[in-house]
């Protein structure tokens, strides 16, 4: 009988199969095979009165997958559950065990950090049992997220007609909105900078005004102060007063964690967090290199910067061979100051699986995006083990009476890790003039007229994906596997827009955040969200349990939901001076995915709508029609959508507005056939009227 290995992703099958004999069959569950039901109180799928027991169902979309897995497992000699080694992966393994329904003695749990022959064979030699503590921790997260998401969504949808809300993404949205409100409230202030241009050894330099020898400069606040400085300097001459030099070390950066990887790929390559993780997943799962399927990098969801002793030994040989012995350090700089001894997690930092597969060697086998990401990972991991660079900083202070002007230069004494990492201009943030010429004390400076630079203070910058991920990591919000999905959720819910890769909260996002903070401040805040992550870790470590944490959350959270539903007054839509052609009631302006539209104020009794599309200042194109109930779920309405991606981009279709709970869709032809096309497009001139003032 064959032995069955079940992985999460089908992309791993070919690579792993190539390592093993024909005695093994490799299959994929394609993630979770069971879903949390939407039954019981508030459709949570959780028995609130029975120890918060979760109710699961097999994923209908995985029906064929489950059937094939069960059939193969039934006849297999042994079954190895090889889902990822994070909490989510442990949960997937447990659900597989529950569904496969085979004798426990046939089931084994294995994990590996990289998809290489050695790693997979080592895992098969050392199987273990499913870690129930990790499973409980993940279930606690799932239940708390279901409670928070469903119950907060009940408030946002009821009171703001907004889309759903969630536990972690609501905190991320709050960070964005708080920053946006600070930007809007910012009042710029004018200040001045003064520069001394001068010539030295036939080269132009600029020294910056530093204040007087009695007072350290904070800023030059007004034109009057500038005029006084210029007047006094024009009356004197410039001489070199002080020259000081000191050496410093520029430390190499540690290997990528999920967070730093997403930040750097965004900053250097311009890819979104989602795209970065998709490319990394492809590199991890492996591809054909010289006729052999090989995984190119280690697991890309990790908080660790640790590297295996085996990798360090291989890197030492490579570094000393290519650069010399003095370039190898072997010590990883921990930028978080946490101490390497405290990192005990299952994964290493993100690194190449095979050092002999250099970026140059594999370039022909990779797509352009894959090559660029692989090169970053490869070079970062090696540079992490290289010696620190040594920099000499020299500051020259030029005096004119009591006034001081300073200029700083930097000289690389030993390039260390920058020998490799300078390819990516890692030093681009260095201030200064590079290597300064030689100066002597009391040397006269050949100056030109002072340069006056009038400036204004600027508001704090909006977040990019990279800076938001960095902020969330600093605050302890979320986990490596959640950063990309949080960004996608905020975009999909239309709570934020991306403008040239900068995240801008929408009016809807600001309104939702404001309401959530006002009513759920004890939950939607940085401190609580980070503390909950610690509580989940405690469950995984056996210091707490699922029931305690879920019960504690529900009992604190549910009263807030009931209070909000009772006390928040639903925002009334704005009435317009226009009557519904079907029932004669007033029309109101409602907000939709594709802009404002008119709707009958008697909805749901009358479902007339008019979608407004501006043609000119005096004319509008109006689409009229009736909304139909979804015939599949019977709850949602079929609403018009426009495809954004794929071959059908730009085409019209109709979908149930209860998606993703109901995924019913009709293309335009199907919709017309099903409902006899009683939606008509009517183009007519409508004179714009001013809104009536309320008495």
Image (tube, rainbow, N blue to C red):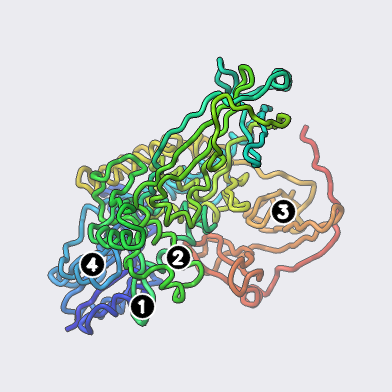
Instruction: Please give the name of the residue rendered at 67% of the width and 27% of the height, measured from the top-left corner.
Output: 191
Q: Is residue 207 left or right of residue 387?
A: right
Label of residue 562 in the image = none
Q: Position of residue 634 (x, y in %)?
A: 52, 64
Cα distance in 3D space between marks 3 and 2: 43 Å
Cα distance in 3D space between marks 3 and 4: 52 Å
- Tag 2 or tag 4, which sits nearer the N-term? 4
Q: Are marks 4 and 1 in contact (CB under 8 Å)?
A: no
- Numbered disc in front, either 3 or 4: 4
Which quarter of the image is occupied by the C terminus? top right
Cα distance in 3D space between marks 1 and 3: 45 Å
Cα distance in 3D space between marks 1 and 2: 28 Å
Residue 319's place in the image compared with 16, above or below, is: above
- Tag 4 or tag 3, which sits nearer the N-term? 4
Which quarter of the image is occupied by the N terminus? bottom left
Q: Which residue is mark 1?
A: 64
- Tag 2 or tag 3, which sits nearer the N-term? 2
Residue 430 visible in rendering = yes
- Tag 1 or tag 4, which sits nearer the N-term? 1
Q: Which residue is mark 2?
A: 279
How many other residues sit within 10 Å of disc 2, few (<14), some (14-19) or many (≥20)? some
- Numbered disc in front, either 3 or 2: 2
Instruction: Please give the name of the residue rendered at 60% of the width and 46% of the height, measured from the top-left corner.
Output: 504
- Numbered disc in front, either 4 or 2: 2
Q: Which residue is mark 3?
A: 598
Q: Find numbered disc 3 in the image and state the secondary structure of the residue it sits on.
A: strand
Q: Is residue 209 left or right of residue 302?
A: right
Label of residue 97 in the image = 4
Q: Are marks 4 and 2 in contact (CB under 8 Å)?
A: no
How many other residues sit within 10 Å of disc 3, few (<14), some (14-19) or many (≥20)? many
């Amino acid at each position: 009988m064959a032995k069955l290995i079940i992985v999460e992703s089908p992309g791993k099958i070919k690579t792993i199969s190539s390592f093993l004999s024909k005695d093994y069959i490799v299959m994929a569950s394609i993630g979770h095979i069971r879903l949390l039901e939407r039954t019981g109180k508030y459709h949570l799928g959780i028995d609130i009165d029975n120890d918060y027991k979760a109710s699961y169902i097999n994923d209908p979309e995985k029906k064929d997958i489950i059937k094939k897995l069960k059939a193969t497992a039934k006849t297999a000699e042994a079954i190895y559950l090889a889902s990822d080694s994070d909490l989510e992966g442990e949960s997937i393994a447990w659900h597989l065990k529950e569904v496969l329904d085979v004798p426990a003695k046939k089931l084994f749990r294995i994990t590996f950090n990289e998809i290489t022959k050695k790693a997979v064979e080592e895992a098969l030699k050392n199987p273990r049992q499913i870690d129930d503590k990790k499973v409980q921790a993940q279930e606690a997260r799932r239940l708390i997220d279901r409670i928070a998401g469903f119950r907060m969504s009940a408030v946002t949808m009821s009171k703001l007609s907004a889309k759903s809300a969630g536990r972690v993404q609501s905190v991320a949205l709050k960070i964005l909105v708080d920053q946006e409100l600070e930007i809007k409230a910012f009042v710029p202030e004018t200040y001045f900078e003064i520069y001394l241009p001068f010539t030295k050894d036939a080269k132009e330099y600029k020294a910056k005004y530093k204040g007087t020898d009695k007072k350290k400069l904070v800023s030059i606040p007004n034109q009057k102060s500038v005029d006084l400085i210029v007047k006094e300097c024009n009356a004197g001459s410039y001489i070199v007063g002080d020259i000081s030099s000191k050496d410093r070390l520029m430390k190499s950066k540690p290997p990528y964690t999920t967070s730093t990887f997403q930040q750097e790929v965004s900053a250097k390559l311009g890819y979104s967090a989602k795209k970065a993780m998709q490319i990394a997943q492809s590199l991890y799962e492996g591809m054909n290199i010289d006729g052999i399927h090989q995984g190119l990098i280690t697991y890309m969801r990790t908080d660790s910067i640790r590297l295996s002793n085996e990798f360090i030994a291989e890197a030492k040989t490579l570094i000393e061979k290519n650069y010399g012995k003095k370039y190898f350090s072997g010590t990883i700089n921990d930028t978080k100051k946490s101490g390497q001894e405290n990192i005990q997690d299952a994964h290493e930092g993100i690194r190449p699986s095979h050092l002999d597969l250099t970026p140059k060697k594999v370039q022909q086998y990779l797509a352009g995006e894959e090559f660029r990401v692989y090169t970053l990972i490869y070079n970062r991991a090696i540079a992490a083990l290289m010696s620190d660079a040594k920099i000499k900083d020299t500051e020259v202070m030029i005096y004119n009476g009591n006034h001081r002007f300073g200029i700083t230069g930097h000289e690389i004494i030993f390039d260390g890790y920058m020998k490799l990492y300078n390819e990516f201009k890692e030093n681009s943030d260095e201030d200064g003039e590079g290597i300064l010429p030689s100066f002597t004390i009391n040397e006269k400076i050949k100056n030109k007229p002072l340069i006056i630079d009038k400036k204004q203070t600027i508001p704090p910058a909006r977040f990019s994906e990279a800076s938001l991920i960095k902020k969330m990591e600093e605050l302890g919000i979320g986990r490596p596997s959640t950063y990309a999905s949080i960004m996608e959720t905020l975009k999909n819910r239309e709570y934020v827009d991306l403008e040239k890769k900068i995240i801008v909260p929408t009016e809807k996002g600001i309104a939702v955040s404001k309401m959530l903070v006002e009513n759920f401040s004890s939950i939607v805040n940085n401190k609580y969200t980070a503390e909950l992550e610690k509580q989940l870790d405690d469950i995984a470590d056996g210091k707490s349990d699922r029931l305690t944490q879920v019960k504690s959350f529900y009992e604190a959270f549910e009263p807030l939901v009931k209070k909000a539903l009772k006390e928040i007054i639903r925002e009334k839509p704005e009435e317009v001076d226009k009557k519904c052609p079907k029932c004669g009631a007033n029309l109101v302006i409602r907000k939709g995915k594709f802009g404002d539209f008119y709707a009958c104020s008697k909805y749901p009794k009358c479902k007339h709508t008019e979608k407004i599309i501006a043609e000119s200042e005096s004319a509008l194109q109006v689409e009229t029609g009736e909304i139909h109930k979804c015939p599949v779920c019977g709850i949602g309405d079929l609403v018009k959508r426009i495809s954004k991606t794929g071959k059908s981009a730009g085409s019209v279709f109709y979908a149930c507005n209860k998606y993703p709970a109901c995924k019913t869709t009709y293309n335009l032809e199907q919709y017309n056939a099903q409902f006899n096309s009683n939606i008509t497009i009517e183009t007519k001139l409508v004179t714009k009227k001013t809104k009536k003032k309320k008495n």
